[in-house]
Amino acid sequence: RGPRGIGFLYVRTASLSRLNEPYQMDGYGAAWSGPNTYEPRPGAQRFENWEFNVAAVIAFGVAVEYALQVGIDRIWVRIQHLAGLLRQKLRAIDGVTVCDKGSVQCGIISFSVAPVPAADLQAFLHAQKVNITHSGAHSTMLDMHARGLKEVCR
């Protein structure tokens, strides 16, 4: 995961006509064709904005070069090992529930500690120099509502 607004997008030219217009377009992604009309630019340029975070684009490029140098497969194996180890250790603690689902899991671990509020756990661990965050139901409303979760730590 990178900074918001930075990433890759590949769309086959033949598929562009089937896509909805981007949520946000400016004068770079679309051209005015009249006082109340516009035409999206051809090709992928319609998904770009005139203003963007240059530092984030440069940093993203450096991160991609580094990942390619290390090797995507090697990184995946390391993420799976470390995340699996942490899930195993968390499950061994009384009161901790690991909330992750799926047969293939990423490196982000979601968990809760009953009856400790997530914000309190975050503050406690921060004081121990352990970095976590917490997400309320508003962050992933459909999933958390379906699973009866009010908040999780990550």
Image (tube, rainbow, N blue to C red):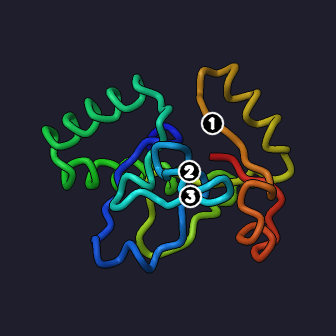
The answer to whether marks 1 and 2 mark residues whose Cβ atoms lie closer than 8 Å is: no
Q: Which residue is mark 3?
A: 38
Amino acid found under the numbered disc labelled 3: Tyr
**Front tag of 3 and 1:** 3
**Label 1: how many Cα within 10 Å (few below 14, some 14–19, many 20+):** some
Dot 1 or dot 2: first in sequence order is 2
**Label number found at residue 152:** none
47 left or right of 129? left
> Residue, x 53% and y 56% (percent of image)?
33
Rendered location of residue 153, percent (x, y): 69, 47
Q: Secondary structure at mark 1?
A: loop
45 left or right of 112? left
36 left or right of 19? right
**Label 3: how many Cα within 10 Å (few below 14, some 14–19, many 20+):** few
Q: Quadrant of residue 132?
A: top right
**Front tag of 3 and 2:** 3
Amino acid found under the numbered disc labelled 2: Met
Q: Quadrant of residue 110?
A: bottom right
Q: Which residue is mark 2?
A: 25
**Label number found at residue 132:** 1
Rendered location of residue 100, percent (x, y): 58, 64
Looking at the image, is 91 positioned above or below residue 16? above
> Residue, x 41% and y 57% (percent of image)?
41
